[in-house]
């Protein structure tokens, strides 16, 4: 079951291709060097662990790419975070006495449902400690990505960025007619104790029972999503359903007007000098002149 926007996913993939090509070369070198096991274990440990980036008393945590529960080879190829890693880093920052502010750097088209509610809850609990939690969207926070952002105290977005795609989806498809037309007979045999096992198997015709099962899945996940956003944004359920798009994406100015985010800003302004902010980051003329690239900023911080 997916919490993802297809439009946002297409946008993200077009930006992730170059990274994937470089990672494939790194992967090939790791295999040829005979250190794949040790090398991969170290990468997974870092991705799923609690080590976060520091800037003054601010912890910076990336929520990027297509989000899955655990770190995988696909996470590595497309430079994506995983829910276990996000949780570990948020918890570590929350428990670190030298950190009084957490900034979530978000560039995600969404991801899987499993792990998403727990990760959102971890971000929400960080807020309850009195530490400021701010999300910055650069350039998209769709579906599960927006779920994460909505649990922060404030959400800011780059001017041409977009957010939304609240909801969940799951595919139900059948290849049975294709096989029948090819003269291939396929039958799924189930044990008498499990007549409903794997409803909606693609080798069988679509059935009402399979539709009902999957509709139940997406309705449950969708309702969890709405409740989380309602709590995180401090608005009632009716407003989320009426104003937050019912699955659509919105550019930053529209999202601000709808109450989905708190305003437009730049990464430099939101990150600031690393100290806790008592005022809302603005989108000043000076900020407009600054680069919005996190990579240049990371170079200056010496952490990327």
Image (cartoon, helix red, strand yellow):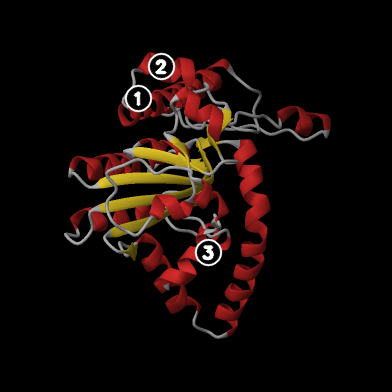
SS state under label 1? helix
The image quadrant that residue 262 belongs to is top left
Residue lying at the far right in this picture: please name it. Answer: 182
Residue 256 % position (x, y): 48, 29
> Which residue is painted at 60% across and 80% down in the image?
29
SS state under label 2? helix
Residue 40 % position (x, y): 46, 72
Q: Nearer the viewer, residue 154 or 167?
A: 154
In this rendering, position of residue 147 left or right of residue 56: right
Q: Nearer the viewer, residue 265 or 113?
A: 265
The image quadrant that residue 182 belongs to is top right
Provide the residue designation for mark 1. Answer: 230
Alpha-carbon span between mark 3 and mark 1: 33 Å
Residue 214 % position (x, y): 50, 25
Q: Is residue 279 above or below residue 217?
A: below
Provide the residue designation for mark 2. Answer: 239
Q: Earlier in the sequence, mark 3 or mark 1?
A: 1
Whether the residues at callouts 2 and 1 have beta carbons within 8 Å, the answer is: yes
Provide the residue designation for mark 3. Answer: 295
Q: Is residue 201 above or below residue 134?
A: above
In this rendering, position of residue 89 left or right of residue 162: left
Can residue 63 be seen?
no
Q: Earlier in the sequence, mark 2 or mark 1?
A: 1
Q: Nearer the viewer, residue 130 or 51?
A: 130
> Which residue is painted at 44% across and 58% down in the image?
71
Q: Earlier in the sequence, mark 2 or mark 3?
A: 2
> Which residue is painted at 39% across and 54% down in the image?
271
Residue 38 % position (x, y): 43, 78
Alpha-carbon span between mark 2 and mark 3: 36 Å
């Amino acid at each position: 079951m997916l919490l993802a926007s297809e439009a946002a996913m297409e946008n993200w993939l077009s930006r992730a291709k170059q990274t994937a090509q470089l990672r494939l070369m790194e992967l090939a070198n790791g295999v040829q060097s005979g250190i794949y096991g040790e090398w991969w274990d170290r990468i997974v440990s870092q991705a799923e662990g609690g080590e976060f980036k520091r800037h003054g008393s601010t912890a910076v945590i990336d929520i990027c790419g297509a989000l899955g529960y655990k770190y995988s080879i696909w996470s590595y190829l497309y430079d994506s975070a995983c829910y276990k890693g996000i949780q570990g880093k948020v918890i570590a920052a929350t428990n670190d006495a030298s950190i009084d502010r957490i900034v979530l750097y978000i560039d995600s088209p969404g991801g899987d449902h499993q792990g998403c509610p727990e990760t959102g809850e971890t971000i929400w609990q960080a807020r309850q400690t009195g530490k400021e939690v701010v999300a910055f969207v650069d350039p998209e926070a769709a579906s599960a990505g927006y779920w994460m952002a909505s649990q922060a105290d404030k959400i800011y977005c780059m001017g041409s960025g977009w957010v939304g795609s609240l909801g969940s989806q799951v595919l139900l498809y059948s290849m049975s007619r294709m096989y029948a037309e090819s003269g291939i007979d396929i039958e799924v045999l189930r044990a008498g104790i499990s007549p409903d096992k794997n409803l909606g198997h693609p080798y069988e015709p679509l059935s009402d029972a399979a539709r009902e099962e999957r509709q139940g899945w997406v309705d449950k996940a969708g309702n969890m999503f709405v409740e989380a956003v309602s709590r995180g944004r401090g608005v009632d359920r009716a407003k989320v359903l009426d104003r937050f798009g019912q699955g659509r994406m919105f550019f930053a100015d529209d999202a601000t007007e709808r109450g989905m985010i708190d305003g437009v800003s730049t990464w430099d302004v939101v990150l600031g000098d690393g100290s806790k902010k008592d005022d809302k980051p603005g989108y000043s003329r000076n900020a407009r002149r600054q680069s919005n690239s996190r990579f240049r900023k990371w170079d200056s911080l010496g952490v990327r």
